[in-house]
Image: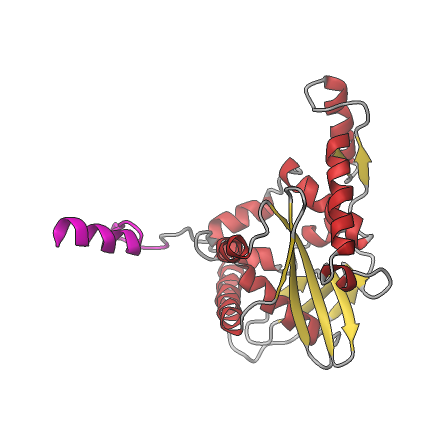
């Protein structure tokens, strides 16, 4: 692809359901760009896009906390009278909620979500960020990358205007919100790609005329539901933006050719593989040195 491509105008959509947003096949999201790169690959990305999975119970808690804090998102259905899903009646109510695009919660889970949302609202940093009436939840933003012609989309949890800047606040639930754990989560889930993509999209759509800052709010799933609020380092943001650029080129080429390669690609010789570099160095020193 060349830089001289026709660029579709940015678009901001309010009130679009999460289901419609995620079902879009004319644009790519942050999770899609991350899935194209190692340890993912284009072939797996395309299969997953073409075969959407049923709702996963592991996401119910996070979706419910989002809805409770942001006031937007999935409706919550409490499965009253049951402590688990062992009984058929409980499973039927759960499946009925999923079919209606709602989040089913057992009473103990509903109590946990309420407690987590309360902690967020009372936190000295997170509370003011998510104060009701001070921002807009889950706007869908579309724009075209001018270098590749790839149509991109982001859906900020919370957009908040401040004098001189716009804040994009992202709420994440995590088992342990300790800073060291969060650092590993950024690496493992490539959240350093999400940050710059959201900033780029928000600014391209004209929603941050004086610039945008991306704020992570991590909430522990374990009582007392501790919270860590952080901004990404500049260097990691630069790495994330470079990863996004590479993923967009891969995506543009795959869409253009119709070829979605796996990790190996079109080779005629069998490649070699070894242990991770650090393990090779450590064991080489111990056994070959």
Q: Position of residue 101 (x, y in %)?
A: 77, 40
Q: Position of residue 270 (x, y in %)?
A: 25, 50
Q: Name the foreground residue: 15 vs 46.
A: 15
Which residue sits furthest right? 133
For image coordinates 77% across by 68% down, the residue present is 160
- Let me know if residue 200 is in the magenta part: no
Q: Is residue 106 visible?
A: no
Q: Is residue 254 above or below residue 99?
A: below
Q: Looking at the image, what colour scheme do you see?
A: secondary structure
Q: Position of residue 161 (x, y in %)?
A: 78, 73
For image coordinates 76% across by 43% down, the residue present is 115
Q: Quadrant of the C terminus?
A: bottom left
Q: Position of residue 5 (x, y in %)?
A: 59, 76
15 to the left or right of 25: right
268 to the left or right of 38: left
Q: Name the foreground residue: 274 vs 221.
A: 221
Q: Name the foreground residue: 61 vs 180.
A: 180
Q: Is residue 216 visible?
A: yes
Specify the segment rendered in magenta: 265-289
């Amino acid at each position: 692809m060349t830089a001289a491509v026709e660029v579709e105008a940015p678009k901001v959509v309010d009130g679009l359901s999460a289901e419609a947003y995620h079902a879009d096949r004319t644009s790519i999201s942050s999770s899609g760009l991350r899935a194209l790169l190692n340890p993912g690959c284009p072939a797996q990305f395309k299969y997953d896009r073409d075969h959407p999975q049923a709702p996963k119970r592991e996401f119910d808690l996070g979706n419910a906390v989002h809805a409770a804090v942001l006031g937007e998102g999935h409706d919550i259905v409490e499965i009253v009278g049951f402590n688990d899903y062992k009984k058929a009646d409980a499973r039927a109510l759960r499946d009925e909620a999923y079919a209606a695009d709602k989040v089913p919660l057992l009473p103990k889970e509903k109590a946990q979500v309420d407690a987590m949302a309360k902690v967020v609202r009372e936190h000295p940093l997170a509370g003011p960020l998510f104060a009701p009436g001070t921002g807009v939840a889950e706007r869908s933003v579309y724009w075209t990358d001018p270098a590749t012609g790839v149509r991109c989309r982001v859906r900020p949890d919370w957009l908040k205007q401040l004098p001189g800047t716009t804040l994009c606040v992202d709420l994440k639930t995590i088992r342990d919100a300790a800073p060291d754990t969060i650092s590993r989560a950024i690496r493992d889930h490539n959240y350093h790609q999400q940050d710059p993509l959201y900033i780029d999209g928000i600014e391209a759509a004209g929603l941050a005329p004086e610039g945008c800052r991306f704020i992570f709010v991590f909430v522990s799933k374990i009582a007392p539901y501790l919270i860590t609020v952080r901004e990404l380092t500049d260097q990691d943001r630069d790495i994330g933006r470079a990863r996004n650029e590479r993923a967009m080129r891969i995506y543009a080429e795959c869409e253009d050719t119709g070829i979605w390669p796996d990790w190996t690609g079109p080779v005629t010789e069998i490649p070699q593989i070894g242990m991770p570099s650090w393990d090779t160095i450590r064991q080489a020193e111990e056994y070959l040195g």
